Amino acid sequence: MTKPTIYIFGTSGFAREVADIAHANDHAVAFLTNDPAQAEDLSDFGEVLPESEVDSLSDALFAIGIGDNGVRRKIAERYAGTLQFPALIHPSASFGVGQRERVEAMPGVIVCAGVRFTNRIAVGAFSIFNLNATVGHDVIVGDYCNIAPGANLSGYVHLHPGVWVGTGAAVNQGQPGAHLEIGANTMIGSGSVVVKSCDPDSIYVGIPAKARG
Ligand SMILES: CC(C)(COP(=O)(O)OP(=O)(O)OC[C@H]1O[C@@H](n2cnc3c(N)ncnc32)[C@H](O)[C@@H]1OP(=O)(O)O)[C@@H](O)C(=O)NCCC(=O)NCCS
């Protein structure tokens, strides 16, 4: 049976990467944007429709192909309870015991090629796990987080909502009952190594990662 089309909010590079995941799962795609005339040519992927078409698509499946955590949150909240956002998982992602089911249960989650989850990981809605990221045991990822390509989260790490972990960053482990905490909306720079908990609403860079003034 033909699988339903996935309608992807956004028309940028990450939207195309989400389209790749949908294609790898045998879905056709189309894109939604406020201004189709300004969108790049996506005819090799699918058609580009105005967002206003959503009203006529209410039984369809949707994804948000936008990396910016704040913009993704706005779109998700705009359509909360009205549109279906299934978790989208690339077939090459791999999971420890019971973990795939935990991810699939969360709306809007995007898991790109090569991601590895071990087990007992809590995954927030509308979080993104980009190419080859790894997520260790007992990690808690809040809603609207973004784990960039090749980032590594050790065990017992807690990302509060809206955290961005940059490309190739490493986060050291916490302990049972004492997770290493990264506060809400904090950004960890690419290539940084986080060795202790981080405040919310901050930018941390370097090895070891320190808050940028
Ligand atoms: C940390 C980050 C958010 C800072 O962005 P920014 O505010 O635009 O910072 P700037 O580029 O203006 O750099 C400001 C200073 O921070 C330094 N800096 C920036 N990113 C850094 C990083 N990842 N590690 C160490 N230092 C960094 C710059 O060298 C500069 O230092 P200087 O003032 O001594 O010259 C950004 O560089 C970053 O790492 N983003 C993550 C990118 C990513 O993972 N993308 C994934 C796409 S899927």
Image (spheres, grey):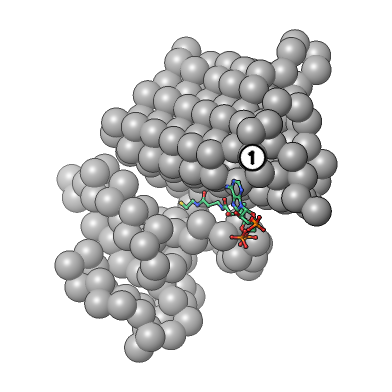
Residue 80 sits in which quadrant? bottom right
Mark 1 belongs to which amino acid? Answer: Gly
Q: How many marks?
A: 1
Residue ID at (64%, 33%)? 207
Where is residue 76 shown, x and y percent of the image? Answer: 59, 60
Between 92 and 208, the one lying in front of the other is 208
Left or right: residue 185 compared with residue 121: right
Residue 127 horizontal/vertical position (percent): 56, 45
Name the image quarter holding the N terminus: top left
Q: Position of residue 155 (x, y in %)?
A: 62, 18
Vertical side of 91 occupied by 176: above or below: above
Question: Which residue occupies the foreground of this view, 4 or 31?
Answer: 31
In what element is the residue under mark 1? Answer: loop
**88 above or below 136?**
below
Mark 1 burial class by Cα count in 10 Å: few <14, some 14-19, many 20+: some
- Residue 122 visible in this rendered orientation of the protein: no
